[in-house]
Amino acid sequence: MQIINPATEEIIAQIKDDSEASCLQKFNQLQLAQPAWKQKFLEERIQIVSGFSALLQKNLEVLAAVLSSEVGKPLQQSRNEIKGASTRIKWLVDNAPKYLADEQMKSESGLEEKISYEPLGVICNISAWNYPYLVGVNVFVPALLAGNAVMYKPSEYSTLTGLEIEKFLKQAGVPENIFQLAAGGPEVGEHLLNLPFDGYFFTGSYKTGKHIYEKCASKMVPCQCELGGKDPLYVASDIADIKSVAAATADGAFYNNGQSCCAVERIYVHADVYDKYVEEFTKEVNSWKIGAPTEEGVYIGPISRKTQLNVLSHQVDEAKQKGATVLTGGKVISRKGYYFEPTVLVNVNHQMSVMKDESFGPVIGIMKVKDDNEAVSLMEDTEYGLTASVYSSKKDRAEKILGQLNTGTAYWNCCDRVSAALPWSGRKHSGFGSTLSHAGLRAFVKPKAYHLVS
Ligand code: NAD
């Protein structure tokens, strides 16, 4: 496997893919080692995972450079991601004792009822490249804390980061055969699907998630899918400061070059504030520095995968043919690397791919709506259900709208945000199951009901 720097198009590493035989061997080792890991006191596992977090911070600059070199995100955004991973780990280790401990449900007149939470066993984590630390931590940290062994398959686009994660987990004290990395792309993913894991935890696209879910069905083990989105944002007529809302929402759409599962993917704006909002939004987008991820102050670097340049060009061209207006951007930047201009489209509608299909890049469509009801029906016109956001000066107005939307996350006056204390879960084609929060800690255990009569 060749690792290519998306900013320079240079091959920066060559890595040997795992084979079917090596996947099986690693699986067998994990299976043998897991019972001893499960027997350890939770405090010991907490200490090891906390040590991993400390190592991430100690090596922040090196790790950020590696991440930027293979996925192309600006250095500062790489640093932010690694710091964010430690914030998440802190919540998970602080709360693991509370949510993984036995629960006493009843204790009276000779009858005790309690629930104990046992690890699933050996779990498989097939992961995405866009936030390898964050989406990785969501899975392997609670899995390890709960006493599972983990086979981790990073995306083929973020393998170097995956290898760093493996190195530092082991340096922190995770036993050799409790965490294994499978290197490679879809083919290696298929090898893992053919093995008898005790649970599958997938982060990636709807297409792959559907395939994985279908393949896992006959195994009768838990399978969780964190998939894509087409997340809508509505700007109501009563926002106080249009300029700052425009800047915050532009960041929600374009941070990490729009390559976030919860990036704002389509915007609806009340007619009363539409003109001013679009003007300020476009001004904000035009103020960003585009350049190499290693340059200070760069906000828009290259996108991570060359193939996505065609998807973005196609979305923009199709929208233009159907009557959209490009206010800024609209095409591939002619320079070395996979650069696409941050693009703002208006006069868009739901006959256009850009308003229906995940863009996963620096392209946004903005649509004028006449009232909240029209906004709700357009926001709901999607196969996805990850997040939705409403900007309004009135909380009850926002909550009324958000309550009508079938999404796992609802934002009022914020967007593109994840909290370790809250469940991260999709609906419809955005997936099912939860990571983070108490639900995400308990996703890696199976409850056992004890009926104890004395
Ligand atoms: P992808 O589906 O192309 O790949 C994800 C992983 O699946 C990779 O490791 C890949 O090698 C593996 N894979 C591909 N085909 C496979 C197969 N047949 N069998 C087994 N494994 C296979 O997705 P991606 O491009 O890495 O990630 C982008 C997508 O992930 C976007 O849709 C994004 O919205 C989504 N995402 C969702 C979340 C979330 O929390 N909901 C977070 C991050 C990314």
Image (spheres, rainbow, N blue to C red):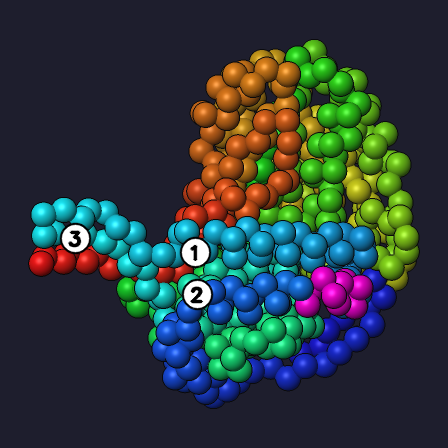
* Quadrant holding the N terminus: bottom right
Question: Which element carries disc 1, helix, strand or loop?
Answer: helix
The reply, left or right, for residue 345 in relation to residue 379 is: right
Relative vertical location of residue 263 with respect to residue 2 in this rendering, above or below:
above
7 and 403: which one is in front? 403
Which quadrant of the structure image shows residue 240? top right
Crowd rating for badge 1 (residues with CA inside 10 Å; few <14, some 14–19, many 20+)? some
Q: Earlier in the sequence, mark 2 or mark 3?
A: 2
Question: Which element carries disc 3, helix, strand or loop?
Answer: strand
Q: Is residue 343 magenta?
A: no
Image location of residue 378, percent across then percent down: 54, 26
Q: Residue at x 14, y 46 (%)?
A: 108
Q: From the image, tell me which residue sits under label 2.
A: 42
Residue 310 image label: none
Q: Residue at x 49, y 82 (%)?
A: 177
The reply, left or right, for residue 201 in relation to residue 454 is: right
Question: How far apart are the two marked residues, 2 and 3, measured between alpha carbons?
Answer: 24 Å
Relative vertical location of residue 111 with respect to residue 324 in this rendering, above or below:
below
Q: Give yes or no for contact between labels 2 and 3 (Cβ–Cβ under 8 Å).
A: no
Q: Is residue 62 magenta?
A: yes
The stretch of residues the image draws in magenta is: 55-64
Q: Amino acid at mark 3?
A: Glu
Q: Residue at x 28, y 64 (%)?
A: 220
Q: Amino acid at mark 1?
A: Pro
* Quadrant holding the C terminus: bottom left
Q: Give yes or no for contact between labels 2 and 1 (Cβ–Cβ under 8 Å).
A: yes
Residue 112 image label: 3
Q: Amino acid at mark 2?
A: Leu
The dominant secondary structure in magenta is helix
Q: From the image, tell me which residue sits under label 1.
A: 97
Image location of residue 411, percent across then percent down: 57, 31
